[in-house]
Amino acid sequence: MKEPTDENLMLKVANGDLDLLKILFERHHIHVYNFLYKMCGDKMLSEDLTQDVFYKVMKYRTSYNSGRFVAWLFTIARNSLNTHFSRVKEHHENIDVVGYKLMEEREEKNEDYSHLQKALDQLGASDKELLVLNRFQEIKYQELAEIVGSTPGAVKTKVSRALKKLRLIYFENI
Amino acid sequence: MNKDDIIALLPEYLDNALDDVMRKKVERHLKECASCSKALEELKTLFKAFEQEERCIPSDRVRTNFYEVLEREKHLASKVINFTPSVRKKWRGPLLKVAASIALLIGSFLAGKQFQKQKSGKEIAQLTDESIKITQTAMLSLMENQSASRRIQGVHFIDEITDPDEAIVRALANRMLHDDNTNVRLTAVEALGKFTTSEIVKNAFITALQTEKDPSIQISLIHTLVKIQEKKAIKPLQRLLQQEETQPFVKQQIESLLPHII
């Protein structure tokens, strides 16, 4: 028997079968957690936010518009992260600035990070976000465009440029 | 195709996401261009690094907490389904509707009643006002009539007017002082007797006392003036006593009543 798709499951959840949300949680929570961890570098915070993301999926289940579930899920994850940063910072700093500061702190504290992670941390937050989603989470351009609110063509170009930047940073310091 | 275009296509080339035409173009260029080949090698290494990057596993806390929240939500959702329609919607909805419609009915009835009252009140006031005006006009024209009985009828109209204006009072005083007919003058005296608080009426009485020759009207005037205790009437009355043509019984009346004016 074929496994039901994410979209099928989510539609049933929206109609009140809340138990099916457990299947979606098992399928995706590690991806969501890793996306958040790559973005903020804080394990505890990533766990809290992962929980928050699935809580929101549950709470706003009726507003699911039967689009691609992964795109919807990561849109929520991304918004949770942004909300967290703007709440933590008194002056609602841009996510780029916040990301950069976090990266600085991380580099001072911890030398355990991979060379790739360090290179990623030197990118702007929006470039980094695209690469994390595209390369780690293997999210296709179509869904990526949905998540960041752009077109697939524009996203493809952005990813390609971000990869070029990352490549230069990565091989500069090797 | 220039270098930048090729480099932009390299990620898709590695992902096998290019169509045949494009892939062949890229491959042809790569054979000739050393720097682009180097870029491709670097990108391969980079992609391998992405693949080899360690996946982190969150602690069980995330799962336990989420499952707990989910159970609570399930409980809440079932509660909503069971109780809402049976208890609240069945009774409160229609009950509220009925209450609202009753309130609306009473409200509009009262409003209509109030409105009607105001309107009819205004109308009645207007009508009364109009009818008084008509009476006054009729009275004034009747008092100018040639026939004495008509004039008397006109004077009698005063009974229908509670608060006559100055024109009416003056017209009545004119009848009392100058009408040729004794009966008209007498009726006018009686009519004016109701409005003795007016200065015009008092003065008219005193003037009439000096000019009136008819004994019955004289007596009527004397009675009225004594009744209202008009001090200005004392001198004309004394003069009447001294006049020879004054009827004896009129003099008698004056003598008996004069002391009553203090």
Image (cartoon, coloured by chain):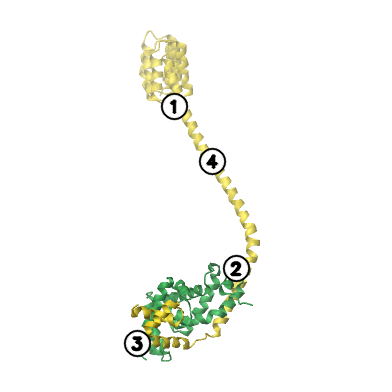
Chain colours: A green, B yellow
Circle 2 Cα neighbour tier, 10 Å, few/some/many (<14 / 14–19 / ≥20):
few
The correct choice, above or below, for A35 with respect to B133 in the image is below
Q: Nearer the viewer, residue B75 or A70?
A: A70
Q: Are marks 2 and 3 on the same chain?
A: no
As shown in the figure, which amino acid type bears the numbered disc 3? Ala
The residue located at (54%, 82%) in the rendering is: B62
Q: Kindly report which numbered mark, 3 or 1, lies closer to the viewer in this rendering.
A: 3
Protein chain holding label 4: B
- Residue under label 3, please give it: B34
Q: Is residue B106 left or right of residue A158?
A: right
- Asked if the residue under mark 1 is in contact with the one under mark 4, i.e. CB atoms within 8 Å, the reply is no
Please determine if labels 4 and 3 lie on a single subunit: yes
Q: Provide the chain ID for the residue under circle 3.
A: B
Q: Classify mark 1: helix, strand or loop.
A: loop
Query: Which of labels 1 and 2 is toward the front?
Result: 2
Residue that mark 2 sits on = A15
